Amino acid sequence: MPHQLERDSLGRLVFVDSNGSRHIGVHPVRAFPITAPGVGIGIMDQSGKELFWYPNVKHITEAELGLIEEELAAREFMPVIEKITQVSTFATPSIWDIETDRGPTRIRLKGEEDIRRIAGNTLLIADSNGMQFLIKDATQLDKVSKKLLDRFR
């Protein structure tokens, strides 16, 4: 019997392995959520143990992929910063007014170490509440945003 992914009556994700064992409350995890989201998705049990590995989203059935994407959307909420409009000070902690793909917001940056380069010009910024914000390509920001960002890196 091949594996199966389904939802139970309580809405939890259930992985049924090839032996027929049911693992309730599993969650998908991308190996490279920012740089290669379609490559490598693991199905993890509640203790963090990997139950199954999909090397590529192309190998996932449409029904399973729908369940996986639903679950990932709830877990991987990461607004994309499109513009930095203002910063309270060039020292940290600092309050930033930003525009994201989800609308304008204000974040608090504790320190320069909260701005991390992921790959190339992609940056990940963590605010003081632990919320993650993505800058897909810092070179594509407008002039004002680049100037403000450069003061912190």
Image (tube, grey):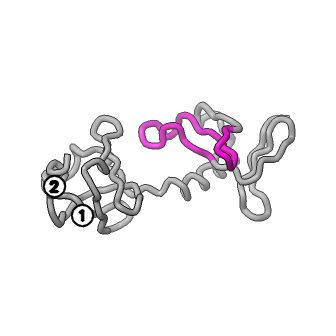
Q: In which image quadrant can residue 59 be found?
A: top right
Q: State whether residue 78 is above or below residue 88.
A: above
Q: Which element is circle 1 on?
A: strand
Inspect the magenta stretch and tell me whether residue 32 lies in it. Answer: yes
Inspect the magenta stretch and tell me whether residue 144 lies in it. Answer: no
Identified at 24% across, 58% down, the residue is 83
Residue that sits furthest to the top in the current view: 55
Identified at 16% across, 58% down, the residue is 91
Amino acid type of the residue that numbered disc 1 sits on in the rendered structure? Trp
User: Dot 1: few (<14), some (14–19), or many (≥20) neighbours within 10 Å?
Assistant: some
Amino acid type of the residue that numbered disc 2 sits on in the rendered structure? Leu
Dot 2 and dot 1 residues touching (CB under 8 Å): yes
Cα separation between marks 2 and 1 = 10 Å
Q: Which element is circle 2 on?
A: helix
Q: Tell me where residue 52 appears, x and y as whole percent.
A: 69, 36
Q: Tell me where residue 56 appears, x and y as whole percent.
A: 58, 33
Q: In which image quadrant can residue 120 be found?
A: top left
Query: Considering only order in the chain, which callout, 1 or 2, is on the residue closer to the N terminus?
Result: 1
Q: State whether residue 123 is above or below residue 81.
A: above
Residue 148: mark? 2
Magenta-highlighted residues: 28-50
User: Dot 2: few (<14), some (14–19), or many (≥20) neighbours within 10 Å?
Assistant: some
Q: Tell me where residue 12 appears, x and y as whole percent.
A: 72, 58
Q: Is residue 139 left or right of residue 125?
A: left
Identified at 66% across, 52% down, the residue is 67
Q: Quadrant of the N terminus?
A: top right
Q: Is residue 78 left or right of residue 144?
A: right
Q: Is residue 140 left or right of residue 127?
A: left
Residue 96: mark? 1
Identified at 19% across, 52% down, the residue is 149
Q: Quadrant of the C terminus?
A: top left
